[in-house]
Amino acid sequence: MRITLDQLRSLQSPVIDLLEILSLEGQHYMARLSMDNQTLLLSEKNGTTSLFRGAWQIQDTLASFDIRETQVVHP
């Protein structure tokens, strides 16, 4: 399933159990969120996967959320 940043912000006190930062050939990164026994891909409003230039950019984007664990996953 997919979730946008706006949808994530609209949730009441969301807790991200696991943030997986997936490296795509070292050039882009995407965020996979585990919350409420669901796995969600952070996506744009048009349904495409949100891509970031670095792991730090994902962490900065999600810094205001309660994240229990973060893992960086390389292929």
Image: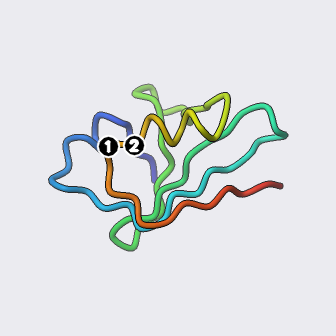
Tell me the element at label 2.
loop
**Closer to us: 6 or 65:** 65
Number of marks present in the image shown: 2
At horizontal 41% and vertical 68% (from top left) the residue drawn is 17
The residue to which callout 1 is attached is 64
| Residue position marked by numbered label 2 in the rendering | 63
Query: Cβ–Cβ below 8 Å for labels 1 and 2?
Result: yes
Disc 1 residue type (three-letter) = Ser
Q: Could you tell me which quadrant the C terminus lies in? A: bottom right
Q: Residues within 10 Å of mark 1 (few under 14, many from 20)?
A: few
Determine whether, in the image, residue 66 is placed left or right of residue 74.
Answer: left
Name, please, the residue furthest toward the left.
12
Nearer-the-camera pick, 63 or 26: 63
How far from the left and from the top, in percent, is residue 53?
67, 28
Q: Residue at x 66, y 34 (%)?
A: 54
Label 1 to label 2, Cα distance in Å? Answer: 4 Å
Q: Find numbered disc 1 in the image and state the secondary structure of the residue it sits on.
A: loop
Q: Position of residue 20 (x, y in %)?
A: 58, 57
How has the structure been colored for display?
A: rainbow
Residue 47 percent across, percent down from the top left:
47, 33
Q: Amino acid at mark 2?
A: Ala
Q: Is residue 26 left or right of residue 8?
A: right
- Local packing at callout 2 (Cα closer than 10 Å; few below 14, some 14-19, many 20+) is few
**Could you tell me which residue is drawn at 54 percent across and 32 percent down?**
48
56 horizontally vs 40: left or right: right
Residue under the point 46% across and 30% down: 44
Give residue 55's quadrant in the image. top right
Is 66 above or below relative to 44? below
Image disc number at residue 74? none
Task: Please state which of residues 59 and 12 is positioned toward the viewer in this rendering.
Answer: 59
In percent of width and height, residue 46 lies at 45, 26
